[in-house]
Image: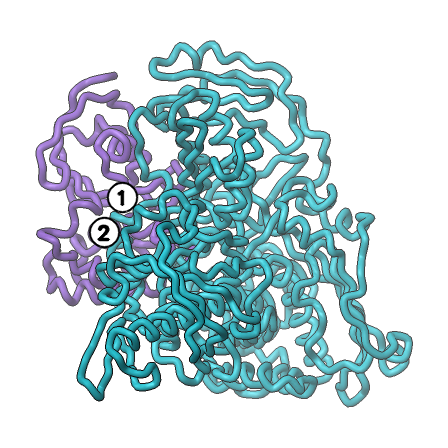
Amino acid sequence: MKQDETTVTANGGVNRRDFLKLGTGLVVYFWAGPMDVFGQAPPAVSTDFNAYIQIGANGRVTCMVGKIEMGQGLQTALAQNLAEELEVAVDSIDMIMGDTDLCPWDIGTFGSLANRQLGPVLRGAAAEARTVLLQMASERLHAPVERLQVKDGVVTDPVQGKRVSYAELVQGKRIERKVGKVAVKSTTDYKVMGTSARRKDAIEKVTGKAKYTADFVLPGMVFARILRPPAHGATLKSVDTSAAEKVPNVQVVKDGNLIAVIGNRPDIADKALGLIKAQFEPSPNKLDNKSIFDHLVAAKVETKVVAEKGSLAEGEKLGEVFEQTYLHSYGAHAHMETHSTLVKIEGGKATLWASTQRPFGVRDAVAQALGFTPQNVRVITPYVGGGFGGKNYTQNAVEAARLAKLVGKPLQLVWDRSEDFMYDRFRPAGVVKIRSAMTKEGQLALWDFTVYAAGDWGSPTFYDVPNNRTVAAPIAELAWRRGDNAGGVHPFNVGAWRMPGTNTISFARESHMDILASKAGIDPLEFRLKHLSDKRMRGVLEAAAKQFGWQPGKTPSGRGVGVSCGLIYGTYVASMAQVEVDKNTGAVQVKRVVTAVDPGTVVNPEGARQQVEGCITMGLGYALSEEVLFKDGEVLARNFDSYEIPRFSTMPKMEVVLVDNRQFPPDGMGEPPIITMGSVIANAIHDATGARLLQLPMTPDRVKAALKRS
Amino acid sequence: MERSIAFILNGKPTRIKVDDERMLLWVLRYDLGLTGAKFGCGTAICGACTVIVDNQAVRSCSVPVKEIAGKKILTIEGLSKDGHLHPIQEAFVNHNAFQCGYCTPGMIMSAYALLLQTPRPAAADIVRHMDGNLCRCGAQVRIVEAIQDAAVAMKGRA
């Protein structure tokens, strides 16, 4: 490769203030060639690749990314992406994640984006870094680049028997060098990607040393608790804070509607909050968790045709039209760590430690709230104690920043569990109506799919149906981005949730397919395969069936087995489950779940397995027990006793089959495996009992009601 | 009532002047600087704040400090000795029995209490004992396996 130019600069153009604190060393600058060098590089991610990598004088590599670690193992998986192309050991990489002063801008950690969108950028950055370093080694060793070999950050010239490390090459220098287009490895050449590199966070997390936002303590810091209305839409009528103000070490502050108690300890502030006497006008909202579905169907929102093929009228002629409606209640994120922020405002600059999936989103929202420029707000993201889409939003951080400004001291705002439920951006309730018809031979002829409130992600059918149409309302996606109530459709704000609407959509589609298979008297796996020409979908179904030991049969067979499949982003999923149903209590015990996933190339098999297990577990929650009950604007789910998430005793035997498909780059892994869970359990319940559940979650009461109907 | 309370904390005699109605969790975290125990629910139903008091697992968010006077407290910070992980911690690492890690200190301390009482628990014993410790990420199956491994490694000793 031709060497373009080398310049040594004093300051390399890095304007991130604390960059120098990382230590001296090589900062590798990249002028990316055409984006196709990196395959999937997305438009939203910085193309200033130098911002991602620093090679220290001590040989350690610092990788800076705006993504955050919330348990999904990105700290390790992203390091593997970098190590693969840079040719350094994964253990030699230190990750700095989610620090808005040190890391390049990032859209946020959601949508299973990290490996599928940031991965190619990091690999491209690392490939260019390696190219620069090899050029430098070539000059140092007086050997042509083509002759050099590199492993674990050491470049060797086998002819002369000489070696030089990356650290030796860059020590004490800042070098700016432009190189042209570089090639990245083919997925089949991966040596680090595709291996189960050990989690980088393990030791810290088992020793209690891992720091989450609320674990940071600053001198003179105070703790805030906010006065909340009993319901969404309830307004403050009168308030008496005198008793709270008398508590030692406690101060009451007001800023418009924001009334808070500030204490020298969190529990002391909390106790004083309980002394505030406040009266509220009731919420004008009259919806509840039963009436919501008719409301959602009737809501006047813009709809669009997402997909269309053939003619619905033609399809209707080919068989009896069968229509069914599927419902899905609101769901909470219920991450174990509630929303938390620590804020310090000093010298016109705000520094936040925040439990967020969107550090740059928090930065901008806080800057706006404080009247600061974004450059004067720094967000540091420690370990996040679970997110699942719930920490995409900024309310907690903005409240903390406003209060810190008011009191003029470093301030921690950790939401109580009750607040965390009330102000959670719930996964929106959704309704799906399906009109279908099939021929006498059991061939699908009509598929008319309408989604209400659950968006359109993953809504077009992947089955071969000659006449089909999918209609959905785009407002839901907007709500997931903004965390609002989607143009007033919902009684409270809603948001993203580990494949929010797709769980609802997939429940409807795959339940309906099962009903049709049963009507046609065809084994449900065979019925699906009969309508599938997509090889990857067939592949995951066949992989799941092999692991499960699927025995074909008409349903209901009494065995309690079910199948489901789904596609979202570029990831294919198939699940099979076995359940036992207590016909007296309506309780469902899931005995076994097999999930096969084809996400393209698997970055870290062990990490991927953990994500699938997490999806199966969280999926059991939305399938069986998780439902946000509410009435007149009041959220009735306020803690883990009124919102039941899966427990040890819920767990089935879980088997994960990873289809490491090297024909494709890594796609999403954190969310896709959850989308089959509602339907696979519903289908297994039907197979066990003949009862068809049409609403999630499938609580014992709903199971009993369905048993009565069947 | 503000008074001086003495107890043994991770093997060290400790004395602190504190309102004795305050819950142990907050005193550990913000008076004694031990932030391993976590706030999860505030009502003793999630287990993130679990610590050991006189060999019993307790929910520190709901134990007033006055109840620990004269007792032995063990938190996650006191579990590894001389830089060596406790076998339970080691087993959690080997099984990747965590994801976000927020519930992990509580899980490990609950498991520690179980193995004190039942050195060789069956899987069903573990499920029963751990059922009140919540994990949202879905590490439960791995946690059960880790506890079984730890029991073997500990050979009946805690």
Q: In the image, residue A537 lies at what x, y percent?
A: 59, 81
| Residue in the image at 64% along x and 59% along y | A501
Helix, strand or loop status at disc 1: loop
Relative horizontal placement of residue A310, taking residue A662 as reference (left or right): right
Label 2 – label 1 distance at C-alpha: 8 Å
Label total for image? 2
Name which residue lies at 59% across and 75% down. A565
Q: Which chain is purple?
A: B
Q: Position of residue A164 (x, y in %)?
A: 22, 73
Q: Within 10 Å of the Cα at label 1, are there few (<14), some (14-19), or many (20+) other Cα atoms?
A: many
What residue do we see at 30% from left, 40% from top?
B59
* Chain cyan in the figure, letter: A
* Residue A516 visible in this rendered orientation of the protein: yes
Name the spot of residue A704 as percent of width and height, x first. 61, 59
Q: Quadrant of residue A541?
A: bottom right
Numbered label attached to residue A207: 2
Residue drawn at x 53%, y 87% is A551
Q: Amino acid at mark 1?
A: Gly
Q: Position of residue A608 (x, y in %)?
A: 42, 70
Q: Is residue B16 above or below residue A245?
A: below
Q: Chain for mark 1?
A: B
